[in-house]
Image (tube, rainbow, N blue to C red):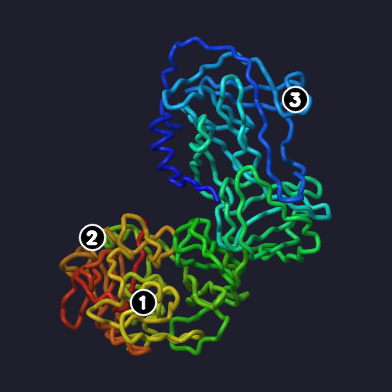
């Protein structure tokens, strides 16, 4: 397989922007050199079919009247679009010769070529200062590019072709792969000179699915040079505006430019397809992807099966999804399926359904691999009352949620006592997955749940184990829960993939006073009512929610006495930073706590 230069944007900047001007550069100064008139000949390249096969319909084997080719020298500004007439084309259609005015040849010492060509002109999207680069705005087309030798262009195929036949009046196809292989790119730029070995590709953002129209019973799909399907492909067929048939394979295959991969007649291989997105299925990740999604109305929802907040980092080899566990945030006996009725995986999406009547609570959905292991998991938060965002007078450094992460209601100052449903979930520092907090007012008993049981490891665990086993607590060992020393699980300039907050929010990171002060009790608006279980900073009210620190299953301590609110930054290799608020000690300060401790999170606006 040919090597692909995947430096992408970096290469474009280095080779195409520095050398070629860049798309956003001011218009280059065009020298006043006289233009030239030349009689140019364009030679079509051949496509290589498999042994014993003929080229499928759709492969361009002859020039046609109306074909348009872009020819350029140094600058795209003065490129010329050549439109072929019937009289320009040879009898066999393999060559076309045309007299072209307005050419500005570009001379370089390192190659003899002075003109460059791109076909079809409709998708040629050259940089302003383009030299010997041809840039295309699509990859699902028979793309041709060439450089001159004298007045002749021997055009080269830029893409390979996949073709198939199927009986039935299908309208469209969609091709994807279970490994999320790149099947195309938002743009493709190639470097061509008189030396064929200098051919290089510069690639834009990857495209993981290709959709196109059928040509009768023939489907023709073009992919860039070196496209690899590491574990087969999935091919869907549309009819009457709906996807109704599907073909799945698991064999590796690859396609190089200028070659045809014929999948043959697939009529007897396709199966009926039941579209999991047909009907009222709502996108819950329209505001962005995250490890937590908030549900406020009953229904069926879907979100991309991606890693944390990385919208294009899809999980590979997902077999199914399931509800891992559920809680009502109190001491009631939880009914399975009461918070989330069902969960499934379908074509890069997690699809879940709530009961017809919402039951406030929290649940975790996991995507499982072919071997049954957890590939990633997501927290579904069903609050009892509507979550609001408020400024809170700078108490948290940013605008913030009115409640703890996972809390079903707001903690209210003056309530006697507070509603224990305002405690919320608790987290080991740096982890994305929640564990249950206190389930009753001022009692050291954590909320009940149904589903997969919690476990406590004998010692530290790896970050991979924390993902594969979201119910496994890393035991305190020198303060940390993980063997992977990393102080940046939550602490980067941008929200990380391990951040447990919903889209638009993150773990607090701004230390401007308030809850993050050396002496929180000296801050404006400070107040505490230990009897009724709340404290406040400015207008922000917090439950004295305790924390989990003894690592026995079900253990939670200091409810109504102490509380810990995590901060995004680490205090040391073994401790996370946070607001450590202790009524029994009379100390209320921004300090540190063992990373293995489970504390509360109050999400702030990104």
Task: Measure the alpha-carbon separation of dots 1 and 3.
Answer: 69 Å
Work out whether 490 lies above or below 198.
below
For mark 1, give the secondary structure.
strand
Which residue sits at x=16%, y=76%? 587
Foreground: 231 or 313?
A: 231
Q: Quadrant of residue 344 in the image?
A: bottom right
For disc 2, the marked residue is 511
Q: Is residue 552 left or right of residue 81?
A: left
Residue 200 showing in the rendered view? yes
Residue 63 percent across, percent down from the top left: 72, 29
Task: Measure the alpha-carbon separation of dots 1 and 2.
Answer: 21 Å
* Disc nearer the start of the sequence (1/2): 1
For disc 3, the marked residue is 65
For disc 1, the marked residue is 426
Residue 37 percent across, percent down from the top left: 59, 12
Q: Is residue 154 left or right of residue 506?
A: right
Q: Residue furthest right?
A: 168
Work out whether 325 lies above or below 537.
below
**Few, some or many C-alpha atoms within 10 Å of disc 3 (few <14, some 14-19, many ≥20)?**
few
Foreground: 546 or 205?
A: 205
Work out whether 576 lies above or below 604.
below
Which residue sits at x=51%, y=17%? 104
């Amino acid at each position: 397989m040919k090597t692909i230069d995947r430096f992408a944007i970096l290469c474009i900047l280095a080779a195409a922007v520095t050398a070629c001007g860049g798309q956003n550069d001011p218009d280059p100064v065009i020298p006043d050199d006289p233009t030239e008139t030349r009689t140019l000949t364009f030679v079509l390249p051949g496509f290589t079919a498999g042994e014993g096969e003929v080229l499928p319909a759709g492969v361009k084997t002859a020039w046609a009247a109306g074909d348009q080719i872009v020819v350029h020298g140094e600058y795209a500004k003065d490129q010329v679009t050549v439109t072929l007439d019937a009289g320009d084309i040879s009898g066999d259609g393999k060559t076309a010769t045309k007299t072209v005015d307005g050419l500005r040849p570009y001379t370089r010492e390192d190659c003899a070529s002075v003109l460059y060509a791109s076909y079809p002109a409709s998708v040629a999207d050259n940089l302003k200062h383009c030299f010997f680069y041809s840039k295309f705005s699509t990859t699902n087309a028979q793309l041709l590019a060439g450089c001159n030798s004298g007045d002749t262009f021997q055009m080269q195929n830029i893409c390979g072709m996949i073709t198939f036949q199927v009986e039935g009046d299908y309208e469209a196809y969609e091709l994807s792969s279970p490994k999320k292989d790149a099947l195309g790119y938002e743009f493709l730029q190639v470097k061509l000179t008189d030396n064929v070995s200098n051919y290089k590709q510069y690639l834009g953002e990857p495209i993981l699915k290709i959709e196109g129209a059928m040509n009768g019973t023939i489907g023709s799909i073009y992919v860039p040079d070196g496209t690899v399907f590491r574990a087969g492909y999935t091919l869907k067929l549309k009819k009457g505006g709906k996807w109704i048939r599907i073909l799945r394979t698991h064999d590796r295959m690859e396609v190089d430019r200028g070659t045809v991969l014929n999948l043959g007649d697939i009529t007897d291989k396709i199966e009926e397809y039941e579209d999991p997105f047909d009907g009222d299925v709502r996108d819950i990740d329209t505001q962005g992807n995250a490890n937590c999604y908030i549900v406020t109305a009953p229904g069926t929802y879907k979100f991309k099966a991606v890693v944390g907040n990385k919208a294009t980092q899809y999980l590979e080899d997902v077999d199914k999804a399931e509800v891992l566990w559920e809680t009502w945030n109190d001491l009631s006996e939880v009914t399975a399926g009461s918070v989330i009725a069902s969960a499934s995986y379908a074509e890069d999406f997690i699809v879940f359904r709530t009961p017809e009547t919402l039951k406030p609570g929290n649940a975790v959905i996991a995507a499982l691999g072919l071997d049954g292991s957890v590939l990633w998991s997501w927290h579904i938060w069903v609050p009892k009352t509507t979550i609001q965002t408020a400024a809170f007078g700078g108490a948290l450094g940013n605008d913030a949620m009115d409640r703890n992460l996972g809390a079903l209601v707001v903690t209210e100052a003056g309530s006697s006592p507070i509603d224990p449903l305002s405690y919320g979930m608790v987290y080991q520092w740096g982890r994305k997955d929640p564990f249950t907090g206190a389930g009753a007012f001022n009692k050291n008993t954590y909320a009940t749940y149904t589903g997969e049981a919690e476990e406590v490891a004998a010692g530290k665990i790896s970050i991979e184990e924390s993902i594969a086993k979201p119910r496994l607590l890393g035991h305190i060992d020198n303060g940390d829960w993980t063997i992977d020393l990393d102080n940046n699980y939550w602490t980067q300039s941008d929200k990380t993939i391990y951040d447990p907050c919903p889209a638009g929010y993150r773990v607090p990171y701004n230390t401007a006073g308030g809850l993050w002060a050396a002496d929180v009790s000296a801050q404006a608006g400070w107040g505490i009512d230990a009897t009724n279980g709340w404290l406040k900073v400015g207008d922000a009210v917090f439950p004295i929610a305790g924390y989990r620190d003894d690592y026995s299953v079900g253990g939670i301590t200091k409810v109504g006495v102490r509380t810990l609110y995590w901060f995004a930054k680490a205090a040391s290799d073994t401790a996370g930073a946070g607001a450590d608020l202790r009524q029994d000690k009379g100390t209320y300060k921004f300090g540190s706590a063992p990373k293995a401790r489970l504390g509360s999170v109050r999400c702030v606006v990104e």
